[in-house]
Amino acid sequence: MDKKIYVSSSPHFNFKCNTTMIMGSVLIALLPEVIMGIVLFGLAALIRILVSVASCVLLEFVFQKVTKQKVVINNLSACVTGVMMALVSPATAPVWIFVVGAAVAMIVAKGLFGGIGSNVFNPALTGRAFMFLSFPAAMGASWMAPKALGGMDAVSSATTLSAIKAGTFVIEDGTYWQYFIGNRAGCIGETSTLLILISFAFLLLAHIIDWRAPVAMVGTVAICSLIAGENLPMSLMTGGLLFGATFMVTDYATAPLTKKGRLVFGFGCGLITFLIRRFGGYPEGVMFSILIMNSIAPFLNNLTARKYGYGKKAGRPANEDSNTKEAK
């Protein structure tokens, strides 16, 4: 029998879903992307996923032991961070770089802030951002061609978004279909639009995520792309937009708690993503947009939260005026 007493502010909700169950559901949702990444990029993808996960779990364990905290690696959150950090990275990245990224994700972005639920920034994206900014050549100099296409070990350093921005990307027969199913070069888990949509539907139906932030983010990018006259399907299917909208902006700890706050959060992520893609020096902006909006999520909670005890003034009863007249 659980004799613990949990003290928290109202409102109170009682349900049987805990952190382990939530993280387990996210891992199930990530499984199609993991399998697809291994099918497309082979052993290189598998090794990087395993190293990333093992590094995250081990480093969290060591940090919690050294700082004499309760070891909570059994809640699977470290596994989720490791899988996501690997899936948003290319299969050509050096193996050692995932150990560095895991250290930043688990110790700097998560552990030093107090552990799961207390972190301000998404750990997987923080680790990935450090890897990308510190070792840009290692993270984006070459991209492995999918095995399904019978490609070489690596292809040109120009990503699809880079080619689109430079005006050199050519759309041929079947291009949209190949991008939809995922037969293209890219990060390990971001290539297949179809599988990401399936994962989104699973998490939504399982009530693990809320639709507001993802829909607001993707919708904002879509509207801005249409206004700017860009190719809408390629704007949505390239880069990490859909993966980030499904797995990153829905993070419980780093996204707003209120419904209105999530809509604003998603809108901000989408707008910043579009602006970086359109006018910035980087071809992709999903990673930076989410991290930027993570920093203002607490303020969005304060701006959009309902203050208990305050509300709309109740209207006067219909017979109030007549009663007043009679009293006079």
Image (cartoon, rainbow, N blue to C red):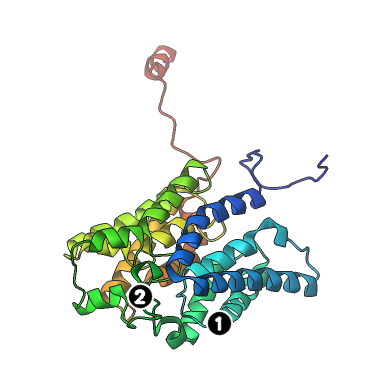
Q: CA distance from mark 2 to mark 1?
A: 24 Å
* Label 1: which secondary element: helix
In the image, what residue type sits under mark 2?
Answer: Gly
Q: Residue at x 65, y 52 (%)?
A: 19
Report helix, strand or loop for mark 2: loop
Mark toward the viewer: 2 or 1: 2
Give left or right: position of 136 versus 271. Answer: right
Q: Is residue 153 left or right of residue 298?
A: left
Extreme-front residue of the structure:
150
Q: Which quadrant of the figure contains the C terminus?
A: top left
Examine the image and state in which quarter residue 39 appears: bottom left
- For the residue marked with disc 1, what is the amino acid? Ile
| Image position, residue 283 (x, y; %) | 32, 76
- For mark 1, what is the residue? 97
- Location of residue 312 with respect to 160 vertically, above or below: above
- As displayed, is residue 62 above or below residue 245? below
Quick check: 249 left or right of 49? left
Identity of the residue drawn at 34% across and 62% down: 270
User: Which of pointers 2 and 1 lies earlier in the amino acid sequence?
Assistant: 1
Residue 105 location (% of width, % of height): 59, 73
**In front of the other: 125 or 119:** 125
Residue that badge 2 annotates:
151
- Quadrant of the rendered structure where residue 155 is? bottom left
Q: Residues within 10 Å of mark 2 (few under 14, many from 20)?
A: some
Badge 1 local density, few (<14 within 10 Å), some, or many (20+)?
Answer: many
Coordinates of residue 77 in the picture (x, y in percent): 63, 60
